[in-house]
Image (tube, rainbow, N blue to C red):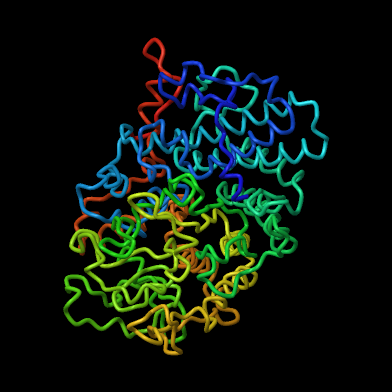
Amino acid sequence: MKKYKLILMTAAVVSSMQLLTSCGDDFLEKPALGALSEDIIANQAGVEKMLIGAYAALDAQGNGAAIAGGGQWEAAPTNWIYGSVAGGEAHKGSDGADQPAINSIATFTADPSNGFLNTKWRAMYEGISRTNATLKLLGQAEDIGDADKTRIEGEARFLRAHYYFELKKMFNMVPWIDETVTDYNQPNNVDIWPKIEADLQFAMDNLPNTQGQAGRANKWAAAAYLGKAYLYQKKYSEAKGIFDQVITSGVTANGLKYGLVDKFKDNFDAANENNQESVFAIQMVANDGTGTIANANQGEMLNYPYNSPFRCCGFFQPTIDLANSYRTNAQGLPILDNYNATPLKNDQGIASNEAFTPDTQPVDPRLDWTVGRRGIPFLDWGAHPGQTWIRLQSYAGPYSSKKHIYWQATADTYSDQSSWAPGSAINVVLIRYADVLLMAAEAEAQLGNLAQAQDYVNMVRARAAKPENKVYQYANPNNPMAGFSSTPAANYNVAPYPDGYFAGLGKEQALEAIYFERKIELALEGHRFFDLVRWGKAAEELNSFFSYEGSLLPDVRGGSFIPGKHDYFPIPQRQIDLQTSGGVSSLTQNPGY
């Protein structure tokens, strides 16, 4: 699949591929120069290239971001801004004056004029436009066999469902535009969940178990996504039925039976990509010959430690609240209710040339594969030095994000230094098997099947408890690339829940344990805000976060989540204006904005 990113979709663009009028600026209505007519590309080769273009939009680094005039990070497919920063698990980072539009997203003071939201909207409809163009051209091509036609339609509809899923969870009511629509000024007055379900069901029913390239969607990626769509709608029985199939029979597109990789860190290492835990991933590649990092996690380019070997830029700093969440008790279990009462020792306010001893109390080892903290190995780049690598510690705290960082030993292969900030070949895994297990656990608990729910959670916790998931001190502190010793870098203690534990908790508390497991397993992967909203816990959790974190750091002070308003982001004003005629827009703004 990585080779698809190298195919240049130059002038082979027809009118049906133009961005939707509802999603574009005025210049989009101008004819494409050098465009090829549909009859020239209405064949299997043309349709396959159109499909590749629909996949390429997954990274949101093409026209969706570029022609909107936005930064490459504004529509990053990791949702680090909308899922993690807005979810209270990460600070914007840097300093207050840098990328101020993120400040308002973090504190829920964003209004419809926020340009980041418009860029995200545009990027998702760019993907939809490409899938629709593929489906339209597919209907005209006469040299494609039935099997290939079905596969192409399944892949295109899977991708369209993904783009609409992103819009649905961010904005809720959005216009549905498919390949049959000719008037793009459609209202947003119809719930699109049934349409998303239909696309995913078709993909599940018609895609093959395996594909020729690991990055293509297969039957089981569609099934996992369908189960997720059911879960978002609280259709727990339907979700359970799908997840049962995925867990029992699911395989990756490259034919690996779904399972958890032994090493948690392998989910975030380009050298171990497309493994058995990767249900569906956006394929990234470094040093592709373009002289850019557009295909190399460009959306994450701001999110490396500042004044470090990575050069730039000090954004996306884990919150103190998130780091504290990894505290465990003597039995190796999480502290669900009051983890902030026993906060992790950190180096806030302590200069890098001053003495500091890291926390010595029990923690979950996933902490140190997620959060970069003073005195703990930062992969093989040396121990994190603390304040020296932080843009402004007094603004956004002492921590650095870690899951998107490439290793020094393989940097020549998997990093890309073609821009003013780094890129990397680390895939963006949209759904991984641990996510599936925890979604399945949630569905089971909602249906009262607490023993099965606990079994799924314990599969995730048992992986975390394996010795290879501890972070170890360097064998030679002066040469981190020489390898690691057998001495753990911290007091790691994590264990599965004992038999009958969830039954003893009861349904509601068991669900709290599942929610907490998602927080610490999937931290900084862009899920948190959307999870909190669908659980109906956003106001409780985020306002508590603002109270605690705001007492320590200034950037989130004044933040407030209002239920019924902030469950969704505002429809971008630019889109409302574009669809206005005679003073009336076909788009209705979300409540409260």
Residue 379, quarter of the rendered image? bottom left
Q: How many marks?
A: 0
How far across and down, in percent of the image, does residue 72 sit? 39, 43
Q: Specify whether 406 is left or right of 503.
A: left
User: Residue 344, position in %: x, y?
Assistant: 30, 76
Looking at the image, residue 144 sits to the left or right of residue 90; the answer is right
Residue 529: give x, y in percent of width and height. Answer: 42, 52
Considering depth in this image, is 366 or 402 the residue closer to the camera? 402
The relative height of residue 124 versus residue 20 in the rendered view (above or below) is below
Query: Is 177 or 358 nearer to us in this picture?
Result: 358
- In the image, is residue 372 above or below residue 129? below
Kindly give the residue lying farthest to the top in the view shown.
Answer: 582
Q: Residue at x 20, y 59 (%)?
A: 395
Q: Which residue lies most toward the bottom here?
A: 486
Tell me what residue is drawn at x 64 percent, y 42 percent.
158
Horizontal and vertical percent for residue 304? 34, 59
Please state, as top left, top right, bottom left or bottom right, where the C terminus lies in the image.
Answer: top left
Residue toward you, 32 or 325: 32
View extreme (right): residue: 146
